[in-house]
Amino acid sequence: MYIRTREEALAAVADILDLPDRRAQIIQSSIAIMTCLDCDPRDFLVDCQALLIEDGLEALRARREEVLETAEPMPLVVLDPEGDRQFRDTASALDALRLSSVVRDVFSDLRHERWMVARALLRREAEVRSRLSEAIRSRGNLEEFRRARRAVDEIVGAERPSWADRAGTLRAACLVVLRADPSLDPDSLHQEAEELFEVFAADDARARALLEAVDRGPHESVLQVLQLREVVAALRALPAEAPADDLSKAA
């Protein structure tokens, strides 16, 4: 049986989560992904597998470490301790932003923006995963679904940062820098600027550092945005998986 829609994918995830054995869950999830005919439900299943069946953010971190061990050349940004820390923090933020789409797809009326959901995943992943699984397995039981949704709404809302009223300042700082790049496709300008903002916003220390730089003047804030953009580009350039022969040797 082929999976053609997001609703069919959601039903498949509910059946998979009911399986008592994790190995069976992973196998059935992989089979479900292969039976998807369209990109949208396939992407949804891939992210559900990463968040709910595998080890979520930790699994994505481990997979990226395997890739870094075989990367040639090694991204320059990871060659010094501070650059390495920023590289890994940014990678975790991007992972959380990616997986937040599962939360927002299941709870389609959730009003929180993607960066807010990502903050909750970074800080309270186990709670979010538990409530999300409950919602998916409710199979239309409105009382159970609404209870899980309220819990997630409270978790995400509790992670609202104290600087949230200055989110527009962060967005503007990112947009100003990208507008100055003549090589950037105007059609992707706002999307890339929003992604940079979201990465800044996912981490309080990173967000506050940029806000302080903005208050001091444009020079420092421009440097911070450019540095983060370079890190994001390095992460995007990494292959999705380590070469199979290298993984077999490691095993």
Image (cartoon, rainbow, N blue to C red):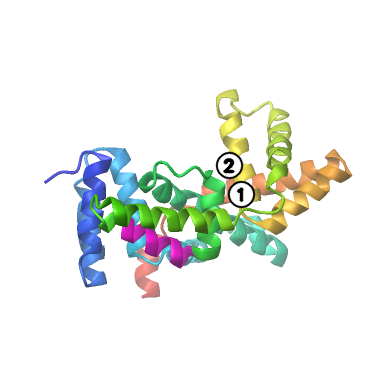
Kind of residue at disc 1:
Val
Q: Residue at x 82, y 50 (%)?
A: 212
In the foreground, 28 or 115: 115
Kind of residue at disc 2:
Glu
**What label sits on residue 199 in the rendered view?**
1
Q: Residue furthest front?
A: 143
Which residue range is magenta in the image? 125-135
Please state the horizontal and vertical placement of residue 21, each as a whole percent of the image: 22, 72
Instruction: Tell me: residue 97, above or below residue 151.
Output: above
Q: Residue furthest top?
A: 186
* Mark 2 crowd level (few <14, some 14–19, many ≥20, 10 Å Cα): some
In the foreground, 149 or 66: 149
Please state the horizontal and vertical placement of residue 66, each as a whole percent of the image: 46, 66
Q: Which residue is mark 2?
A: 195
Please state the horizontal and vertical placement of residue 217, each as a whole percent of the image: 87, 41
Secondary structure found at label 2: helix
Observer able to see residue 72: no
